[in-house]
Structures are given as C-alpha cells and as structure tokens.
Amino acid sequence: MNNNELFVTLISSLTSQAWIQLGKIKNPINDKIEKNLEAASMSIDMLTMIQDKTKNNLEEYESKLLDQSLSDLKMNFVFEKNKKDVVKEEEKPEEKKKNSKKTESKKK
C-alpha cells in the first residue's frame, strides 16, 4: 500500500472506531451495540489532531474524507451527549418525587 492508501485506511479505521463508541454501529468483535462517549471523544480528538497536523499537506479527496468524517462524528457526538443529558434531567423529577414522599411520611 502506498501512503495515500494507508492514510485513508487510518482515517477510516479511526472513524469506524468512533461510530462503534458512539453506539451507532455494532462492535464486530462481540456483535453488540456499545456506547462509550469518553472513548468516542478521544477518537474524534485524534482525528482532529490528524487534521490539524496534516493541514495543507493532503490530497483533495483525503481532506474531504477527513472533513466529512469529523463533521458527521461531531454532530452525532453532540446528539448522543445531549440525549444522555436529557435522560439525566428526566430522572431528576423522579428523585424529587421520592424525596417529597419521604418528607410526607416523616410529617405523619
């Protein structure tokens, strides 16, 4: 393989890894959907670092591949992160109900 092919393979590999970590595709090793947003963030950060370090040194198709991969991953990461935060917020009213029930039972 030449360097251009190796670069595309590297970007594709890191991108696939990030999609797995975002829980968007199955892990091919265990055939399960798994979500690890911290690991996904690290993969996205590595791709961003590669983009920064290779700026103005890529073929047009390599640059487009990297740009599009990062754009899609970042958008999906924000979506997953916000979804996780919404779930946490939805759990809070439950805790308030439990706490108010405890307060009511203490009053009796």
Image (cartoon, rainbow, N blue to C red):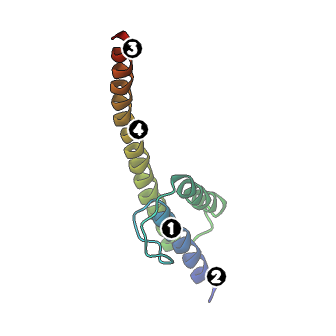
Q: Which residue is mark 3?
A: 106
Residue furthest out toward the top: 107
Question: Is 9 placed above or below 16 here?
Answer: below
CA gap, disc 3 and disc 4: 27 Å
Q: What is the secondary structure assignment of the residue under circle 1?
A: helix
Q: Is residue 51 left or right of residue 97?
A: right
CA gap, disc 4 and disc 2: 45 Å
The picture places residue 33, in percent across and down from the top left corner, at 42, 66
Label 2 CA crowd tier, 10 Å (few <14, some 14–19, many 20+): few
* Residue 63: mark in rendering: none
Q: Is residue 9 left or right of residue 34?
A: right
Residue at figure coordinates x 33%, y 22% from the top left: 101
User: Between tags 3 and 2, which lies in front?
Assistant: 3
Q: Which residue is mark 4?
A: 88
Question: Is 73 placed above or below 101 here?
Answer: below
The picture places residue 16, in percent across and down from the top left corner, at 49, 70
Q: Earlier in the sequence, mark 4 or mark 2?
A: 2
Q: Which residue is mark 2?
A: 3
Amino acid on which the number 3 mark rests in the picture? Lys
CA gap, disc 4 and disc 1: 28 Å
Q: Which residue is mark 1?
A: 15
Label 3 CA crowd tier, 10 Å (few <14, some 14–19, many 20+): few
Label 1 CA crowd tier, 10 Å (few <14, some 14–19, many 20+): many
Amino acid on which the number 1 mark rests in the picture? Thr
Depth check: give the residue in front, 9 or 30: 30
